[in-house]
Amino acid sequence: MQNTFALRGNLVYTPACGELALHPHSYLVCENGALAGIFDTLPARYAGIPVEDHGDKLILPGLVDLHAHAGQFAYRGLGMDLELLDWLEQNAFPEESKFADPHYAEAAYRLFADALTRSATTRFCLFATLHRPATLRLMALLEAAGLRGFVGKVNMDRNSPDTLRETTAESLAETCRWLEESADFAHVRPMLTPRFIPSCTDEMMAGLGRLQREFGAPMQSHLSENLSEIAWVAELCPGTRFYGEAYARHGLFGGACPTVMAHCVWSGEEERALMKENGVFIAHCPQSNMNVSSGIAPVRQFLREGQHVGLGSDVAGGAHLSIFRAMTDAIQASKLRWRLVDQDLPALTMPEALYMATKGGGAFFGKVGSFEPGYELDAVVLDDAALPTTRPCTLAERVERVVYLSDGQPCAKYVAGRRLF
Ligand code: GUN
Ligand code: FE
């Protein structure tokens, strides 16, 4: 039985939103990169397969970062006293301009790829910058690290500094070339990435819509994040009833175009109805929403409506790359929203946050984010012995402590059945 092995340890996952499945000291069998099953004792048919015994440690599905900016990692934790649009102009755009220099890009993306590799994140949707060569280099680093996910060359042809703007024709031609060159990568795939509507003309969006249909690539962008941004979009796109229409009218809002929209803090009923109808994934990024004063997204509402919801670090709007941190931020922000804004939307729970961090966001990648049979085996092994306590804890409590207290770095990590460390 080649390509078959088992992990042993305390297995925890979320088969449904809010539901924790707990398998103490159990075996998880992986065949050809996918999960064959979970067993108390190893069945006779698997006798003799290699067993990686992780003792009393916790084993969780790999976490999913549905929205982050690799090109902003180097300045995370800096410049956090501004609201979104000023923050973009004064921090994000000057930093991203530096990626025109291949030496700078190499150094910054190496730092990012190393940090992501050591983290509990196994899958991702990332913004690079608008620079094609640097974006390809980021994809190569992530692929070499054994990680899987999507990366986008950013498109910007208006309302951006001279150092971070392409002409429409140039941007579309570079995007087309980048999509062709990305064929070199097996597991880190390209994703169309118009930055947001204020950065992209109608001609650009129409061109990206054509490229989407030609290449079948998924897309990602920002949606209804901040009130000043939304007012600006309404001015830039007269005739649209809501922000999402500015994407939808170019075929870039779910449906045949798998789509991740970051934030959706202020998405109204019509926008949410279209997201639901088209299966748009929402990347909830609570820390960024607090840092750049955007607000608190109504995540309970999203879940009730049956929207696809995952979590995003949104580095560097979010200062922390850890999706464990995004889980606790999501729970805490939802408590404030319930207390201060809307008592009809109860706070999120730890099992719900774990679901969004794993199976919720993982669904964008196929069968990812759970330990159910047939799922790709993404797993992280966590050692809570490093967080000693005098209190005896149940398995569920141990998971909660690790999420709240650890820096999120696993001691072993598997992506699609391959052990990275
Ligand atoms: N909207 C457009 N660009 C960005 C960005 O880089 N970060 C965040 N948080 N929002 C954006
Ligand atoms: Fe973002």
Image (tube, rainbow, N blue to C red):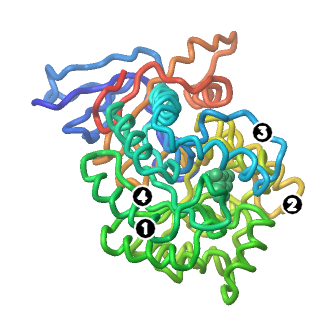
Which amino acid type is shown beneath numbered disc 1? Leu
Residue matched to label 3: 79
Q: Dot 1, crowdedness within 10 Å: few (<14), some or many (≥20)?
A: many
Question: Looking at the picture, which amino acid does disc 2 mark?
Answer: Val
Pinpoint residue 297: horizontal percent, then vertical percent. 72, 59
Single out the mark in the foreground, 4 or 1. Answer: 1
Q: What is the distance, in whole Å, between disc 3 and disc 2 at their CAs?
A: 28 Å
Residue at coordinates 62% horizontally, 46% vertically from top-left? 314
Residue 402: x percent and y percent?
61, 26
Real-space CA distance between mark 2 and mark 4, rounded to the nearest whole angstrom: 35 Å
Tally of numbered tags: 4
Which residue is the site of mark 2?
341
Q: In the displayed image of the protein, which residue is found farthest to the right? A: 340
Q: Which amino acid type corresponds to the residue marked 3 in the rendered image?
A: Gly
* 151 w.r.t. 206: above or below: above
Residue 360 in view of the camera: no
Question: What residue is at 40 percent from the left and 46 percent from the top?
Answer: 133
Judge from the rendering whether residue 408 lies leftward or rightward of residue 372; answer left or right: right
Which labelled disc corresponds to residue 191? 4
| Left or right of 151 in this view: 157 | right
Q: Where, quadrant-wise, is the N terminus in this rendering?
A: top left
Image side of residue 64 versus residue 25, left or right:
right
Badge 2: residue crowd in 10 Å (few <14, some 14–19, many ≥20): few
Query: Considering only vertical position in the picture, is 294 above or below 279?
Result: above
Q: Which residue in the structure is indicated by mark 1?
A: 172
Mark in the foreground, 4 or 3: 3
Between discs 2 and 4, the one toward the N terminus? 4
**Sequence-earlier tag: 1 or 3:** 3
- In terms of secondary structure, where does tag 1 sit? helix
